Image (spheres, grey):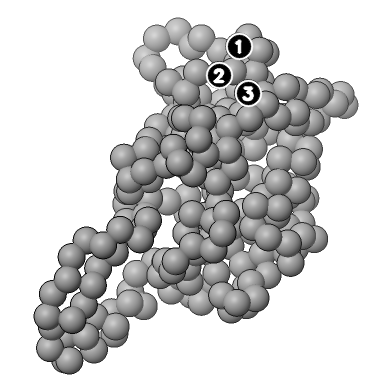
Amino acid sequence: MVTRYDWAGTQLGRSLVEPGDIIKMLGGLQNNAVQWHRPAPGVVAFGTDANGKQRCLVVRPAKRTKIRCDVGNKTKRLDVHMPNLLAELVGEGDAANPRWKQIAAVYCFAGRGGVKSLSNDTVLRVPPLPNVYRTGKICMGSVNVSTWEKLKPAEVFEKAFIETPFTDHILTAPLEESGRKAKYRNVLHALKETRGRVPLGELVRLGTFGELMKGKFNAE
């Protein structure tokens, strides 16, 4: 008997299979980009990819956030009404003792409930921040994520991404191109004009969370 579950642990169905079928199913696992396991507390999903690296999806609930941005020779302090963020961390080692080395991507989504606002149909967008490409992949610059490699995933994301300085690189990528005259010159202008509350409709749409989990789009 084989039981199938979705990413949230909801049972999708059960069926009888022959032993040979089980062997074929297990033998094909390495062909998937990521093998997701049951999430640890505070984590949406955790898995091992085809290269043996540990991957973790962690949610940062929407809340007002102060960030630092170095623009030229000046430092700006911005007060951002940050939407829910979904970050993908990449680490080395085994699932029991991962060492986080990279933040592969960051997405944002609507709602006020953090993880509770996330479902298979939730639309993911590029967050309203500098240093983020149109795919959700981010530029970490000189930030060394390994500094916090032994912390919990949510803490790694907070310290290595939110609390480190942003720069004036990759400023236009998060904004949607609508074919009309651009409302904002770049994401810093958008944050200024909206007092830190950039409408999600102005941000690049990437796909749904369900599509992300199925590997239909990614940051690499």
Instruction: Name the residue at 16% across, 91% down.
Output: 20
Separation of marks 1 and 3 at Cα, in angstroms: 10 Å
Q: Is residue 217 among the parts visible in the rendering?
A: no
Q: Secondary structure at mark 2?
A: loop
Q: Which mark is residue 198?
A: 2
Which image quadrant is residue 180 in?
top left
Which image quadrant is residue 42 in?
bottom right
The numbered mark, 3 or 2, whose residue comes first in the sequence reads 3
The residue type indicated by label 3 comes to His
Separation of marks 3 and 2 at Cα, in angstroms: 8 Å
The foreground one among 21 and 75 is: 21
Residue 55 vs 202, above or below: the answer is below
The residue type indicated by label 2 comes to Val
Q: Secondary structure at mark 3?
A: strand
- The residue wearing badge 1 is 194
Which image quadrant is residue 144 in?
bottom right
Circle 1 or circle 3, nearest the eye: 3
Separation of marks 2 and 1 at Cα, in angstroms: 6 Å
